[in-house]
């Protein structure tokens, strides 16, 4: 059968028309897909509220303040001017009767020794010790002194060594002008002997006089000369008003040159001490009186016993007793103290996520199925910066809710809505 002459032309037109329809359908389909994706993106990132997962943290229920350290300390004072040589570093623990420091007073002893020689000459003149028998006795005394010197060197008993050397030096004959003894000869022998003993003790006041009076921590810093923070004071002394008046300004010694009758060093007993901690309210720690609690002093963790709480019109002060770590915290005398009452597992969420429910109950919105959200009651433990710390509840994961009841609370795997203002009220489900 013969085809018309325009058959091919019609066929091409038909094919072109079909291609146009296909392209139009493909374009419409692509447009619908783009619109659907755009709608999802819009609802997800523009219309739908943002969400976040809670961060698991450890919450510490604490009481903070600036505490005053109360401990036993003994201050040693210098007995002469001179150059100090320190044998023990600041903060080191020593036993009792350890030589902590030496004072070289040799440059100050020449005049004292000259006076001692004159006193001895006056005593000899009064005794007229020139007969042979007395000379033999004196020789035997000198031999005894020499043996003592040898023993003191062996035993490292330097205090007695210095005294014996001075005794031997005095027994040696010295040339003294009688005119220098006029005033001394007016004194009795007993008065001369007494003066001789005083000057001998003064010469012997060297390193061995500067031993630790008690076992404990050696310090060259002083902050309580008036003993306002002494363990000898009763606990009732440490009121808020009393502590405000205590001066704990630090004075540091430990220099090479020292003067007579100045504070040289102190020894701090480290087996027991107290902290007087001013607090805002007696109720913060009253349930813990008679109990041990963790305490952080500065950056050091230890345990403290809550002994008592002093309360009057001036304020409230908790008295804590401690036994450990004084070596790390003995200075400064007034420093930051944190009493940790309890440690709880908790979660941290943006504080904007916490809202009030219909009955005034605090809670958060949690994503549920099919675009619904669930109101979950929460117990806000604290607000720190931009975050709220929420309790994970009791062993049954519940917290107190309105009406004296308990309800299920937030869990770490709940998806929290952080933009509660964007939540559709019709989509909220309450427990």
Image: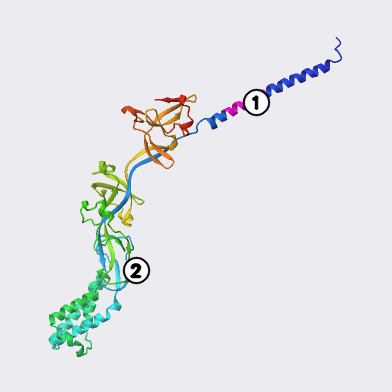
The segment highlighted magenta reads 28-39
Mark 1 or mark 2: whose residue is earlier in sequence: 1
Decide: few, some or many residues near mark 2? Use Cα within 10 Å; few <14, some 14-19, many ≥20. Answer: few
Decide: is 1 above or below 235. Answer: above
Q: Residue furthest front?
A: 313
In what quadrant of the picture does the C terminus appear? top left
Disc 1, SS: helix
| Residue 111 coordinates in the image, percent (x, y) | 26, 81
81 shown above or below 223 = below
Name the quadrant containing residue 41: top right
**Is the stretch drawn in magenta largely helix, strand or loop?**
helix
Q: Which residue is mark 2?
A: 255
Residue position marked by numbered label 1 in the rendering: 31
Left or right of 349 in this view: 303: left
Q: Is residue 419 magenta?
A: no
Sort mark 1 into few (<14), some (14-19) or many (20+) by Cα contacts within 10 Å. Answer: few
325 or 389, which is in the foreground?
A: 389
- The x and y percentages for residue 157 are 24, 70
Q: Nearer the viewer, residue 396 or 262?
A: 262
Mark 1 vs mark 2: give the one in front.
1
Q: Is residue 125 above or below residue 51?
A: below
Q: Where the N terminus falls, by quadrant?
A: top right
**Camera-nearest residue between 393 and 251:** 251
Residue occupying image coordinates x 56% and y 28%? 40
């Amino acid at each position: 059968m013969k085809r018309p002459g325009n058959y091919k032309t019609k066929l091409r037109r038909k094919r072109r028309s079909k291609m146009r329809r296909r392209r139009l359908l493909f374009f419409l389909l692509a447009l619908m897909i783009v619109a659907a994706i755009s709608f999802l993106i819009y609802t997800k990132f523009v219309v739908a509220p943002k969400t976040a997962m809670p961060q698991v943290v450890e919450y510490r229920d604490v009481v903070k303040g600036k505490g005053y350290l109360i401990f036993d300390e003994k201050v040693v004072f210098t007995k002469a001017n001179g150059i100090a040589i320190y044998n023990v570093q600041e903060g080191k623990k020593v036993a009792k009767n350890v030589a902590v420091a030496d004072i070289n007073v040799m440059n100050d002893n020449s005049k004292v020794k000259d006076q001692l020689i004159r006193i001895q000459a006056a005593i000899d003149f009064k005794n007229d010790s020139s007969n042979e028998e007395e000379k033999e006795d004196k020789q035997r005394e000198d031999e005894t002194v020499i043996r003592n010197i040898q023993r003191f060197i062996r035993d490292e008993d330097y205090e007695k060594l210095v005294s014996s050397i001075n005794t031997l030096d005095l027994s040696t004959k010295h040339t003294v002008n009688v005119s220098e003894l006029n005033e001394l000869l007016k004194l009795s022998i007993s008065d001369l002997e007494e003066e001789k003993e005083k000057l001998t003790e003064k010469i012997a006041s060297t390193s061995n006089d500067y031993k630790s009076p008690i076992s404990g921590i050696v310090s060259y810093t002083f902050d309580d000369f008036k003993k306002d923070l002494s363990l000898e004071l009763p606990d009732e002394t440490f009121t808020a008003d009393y502590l405000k008046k205590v001066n704990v300004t630090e004075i540091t010694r430990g220099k090479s040159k020292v003067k007579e009758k100045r504070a040289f060093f102190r020894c701090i007993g480290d087996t027991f001490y107290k902290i007087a901690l001013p607090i805002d309210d007696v109720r913060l720690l009253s349930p813990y009186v008679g109990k041990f609690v963790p305490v952080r002093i500065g950056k050091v963790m230890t345990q403290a016993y809550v002994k008592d709480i002093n309360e009057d019109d001036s304020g409230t002060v908790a008295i804590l007793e401690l036994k450990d770590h004084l070596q790390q915290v003995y200075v400064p005398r007034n420093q930051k103290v944190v009493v940790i009452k309890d440690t709880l597992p908790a979660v941290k969420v943006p504080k904007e996520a916490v809202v009030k429910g219909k009955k005034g109950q605090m809670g958060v919105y949690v994503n549920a199925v099919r675009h619904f959200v669930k109101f979950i009651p929460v117990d806000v433990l604290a607000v720190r910066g931009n975050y709220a710390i929420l309790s994970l509840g009791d062993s049954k994961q519940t917290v107190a809710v309105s009406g004296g009841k308990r309800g299920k609370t937030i869990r770490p795997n709940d998806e929290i809505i952080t933009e509660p203002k964007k939540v559709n009220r019709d989509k909220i489900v309450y427990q």
